[in-house]
Image (cartoon, coloured by chain):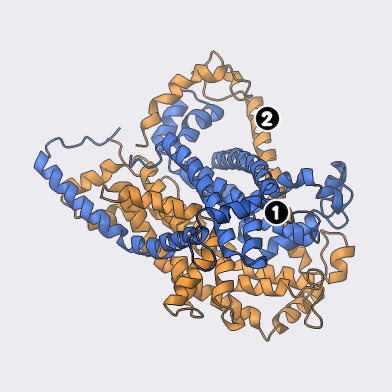
Chain colours: A blue, B orange
Amino acid sequence: MTLTHSPAGSATRRRRGTARQSRAGMAFVAAYAVLLVAFGVLPTAYAVYFAFTDAGGKVTGFANFVTAGQDFRFLDAVSHVAVYLVFWLLSLVVFVVALALLLHRLGSGSAGKALRFLYYIPGALAGAASVLVWLFMLDPTVSPVSSLLGALGFHTFGEVIAPGNLPVLFTVIAFWTGAGGWIVVMYGALDNIPTDVMEAARIDGAGAWQTAWHVQIPMLRKWIVYMVILAFAGGAQLFVEPQLLSLASVGVAGRDYSLNQLTYDFAFQMNNVNGAAAVSVELLVVSVSAAAVFVARSGFFDAE
Amino acid sequence: MPNKSFAVPAAATPHAEGEPGAMSRPRQRTPERRRPRPRRRVASRLLTGSVLAVFVVFFVLPVLWLVLAATKTDQQLVHDNPLSFGSFHALKANWDALTAFQDDAVLQWLGNSALYSVISLVITLGVAVPAGYALAMTEFRGRHTLLVATLVVMLMPNATLVVPLFLEINAVHLIGTMWSIILPYSFYPFGVYLTYIYFTTAVPKDLLAAARMDGCSEFRVFRHIALPLATPVIALVGFFGFVADWTNYFLPYVMLPESSQMPVQVGVGTLLSSVPSFNPTVGDLAIQRPQLALATLVAITPVLIVFLFAQRFLVSGMLAGATKE
């Protein structure tokens, strides 16, 4: 299957090759490293610094964390986000992988292309646009799917946005805008599974279901891990959807719902940039810990 | 290596037989038969088709509503059938009202967005693709650190980074210039990871090793072997990078407060705050909801065009059999 490595390469030649590769590798990443430090590492370090200091720049240890944690909305927000994350991650992984596999079975013809495009369209809508769309979709009096909402037992906007429904609603909205892009990524990854591997599975008599489960999904592992890491962080940063809903319901539902809304409130309503930074650093720590688990278990960083 | 799970399917067959999946049943005890019975096939096709169709409705229906909304008056939007067409007359009137807002401001916003996105896209591609390639295919000191740092930075809540970025850009006196957003946009860690994963999963290292054996310089290996194989991922990075820049709201909102410099996302945001139903304090300058719907459609059209263009390059089977003996 693989090219036979020429075993003739002597030890010295290999070492020289490694040194050459190392220099080249550094050259290839140099420009990126500069941008990473300037627009990634520095601002992050700055935010962490904010989290441990007060408005005057004096080091305060964990005081900001204590203040934020004692905010009466903090624990509620934590539990909201936790419940939402369960719905969001499950639906994203299951449906994105399933839809990508189904689309891939359609082949590269025009039907598959058209469907990928249709699934992607909401991904282009950001911010203000989805405010307008979902405000109408969820209001049974003007919604195009009001009969569906009615069948589910919802007859007023107030019933739709009852607190118990919110995690599902936010998942639906986030999925609507976010899934299309990942479907494109997964589809591309499926396309790059070598045809001989797929051929071998077929010759062995594997059906579509078995091929998907035992060949394609294992080979998508890195992509799925990457999606889960980013979706976890993105979900923990839930902001637009509840903010949108609180705007649409004039503050009845979705206000101060998530942790990120709290940071926003700290920074721009209460003028407490340091408290906001403290909450953000907590989110970062949680996301990085989750990512570390996934990375360690999947060999994500191995240059295979 | 892509071949790792090569042996899996054969071993897997008995394992899957116990599962109730509709597709596995007809194959029991007849592993040499490659196709399920026709009726089964029809059933599975129907299932596939209906799942795909349900999701089409889910993804498209709200968009269809938005398109139709642009053809209505505000009255019709609330009282007519949600999925009815208004009139071309109303569409024209909405367009006129939209362009009348601050004298063609919408067109200027579109131009700004295009300028910012295209320049950053060029830098992003030039920086992210070689970096992702090197992280995946070469060993060098600091490789692991770069991977970890990139991931951590990506996980940092974006809204929090805006204030430090502002202070940083302010320190080099670039606030109010287009570079205040183009430079931060050019840093696109998501794209670096896309390229990284693409190369680690889809491009066999042996292929590059063979070229090195033949005496290719590292740059030539990248330029003549890796890059042609990377077309699909370059298209992906280019597309997602463009969209990320085009739809970014918060950064330009902070960095470029002048209306003449706004990209279209921020512009649509200002329109939103001029809609009476969202902000009852606006008076005569009001924008109606159908006009906002139209503005939204105008704002997303370039993204959709770029998607269609990029999709042509997400070609399949580039590496099919690349390492076959």
Q: Label 2, secondary structure: give it.
A: helix
Three-letter amino acid code at disc 2? Ala
Instruction: Name the element at disc 1.
Output: helix
Near-viewer residue (B91 or A149): A149
Decide: is A52 above or below B99: above
Q: From this viewpoint, which residue is outermost toward the top? A: B29
Q: Residue at x 50, y 47 (%)?
A: A285
- In the rendered image, residue A304, in percent from the top left (x then y), is placed at 33, 39
- Residue B167 at x, y percent in the picture: 48, 72
- Can residue B179 be spotted in the picture? no
Q: Mark 1: give few (<14), some (14-19) or many (20+) Cα within 10 Å.
A: some
Residue A281 in sight here: yes
**Residue placed at 38% from the left, 53% from the top?**
B230
Q: Position of residue B41 (x, y in %)?
A: 63, 29
Q: Quadrant of the C terminus of chain B?
A: top left
Q: CA distance from mark 1 to mark 2?
A: 25 Å
Q: How many dots with numbers?
A: 2
Would residue A163 appear left or right of B180 to someone viewing this image?
right
Corner quadrant of residue A279 = bottom right
Q: Which mark is residue A265?
A: none
**Amino acid type, callout 1:** Val
Q: Which residue is mark 2?
A: B43
Q: Dot 2, crowdedness within 10 Å: few (<14), some or many (≥20)?
A: few
Q: Are discs 1 and 2 located on one and the same chain?
A: yes
Instruction: Look at 56% across and 55% down and name the residue there.
Output: A63
Q: Residue B78: name its quadrant.
A: bottom right
Residue A162, x across and y down, in percent: 81, 47
Give the mark, 1 or 2, whose residue is nearer the N terminus.
2
Residue that badge 1 annotates: B60
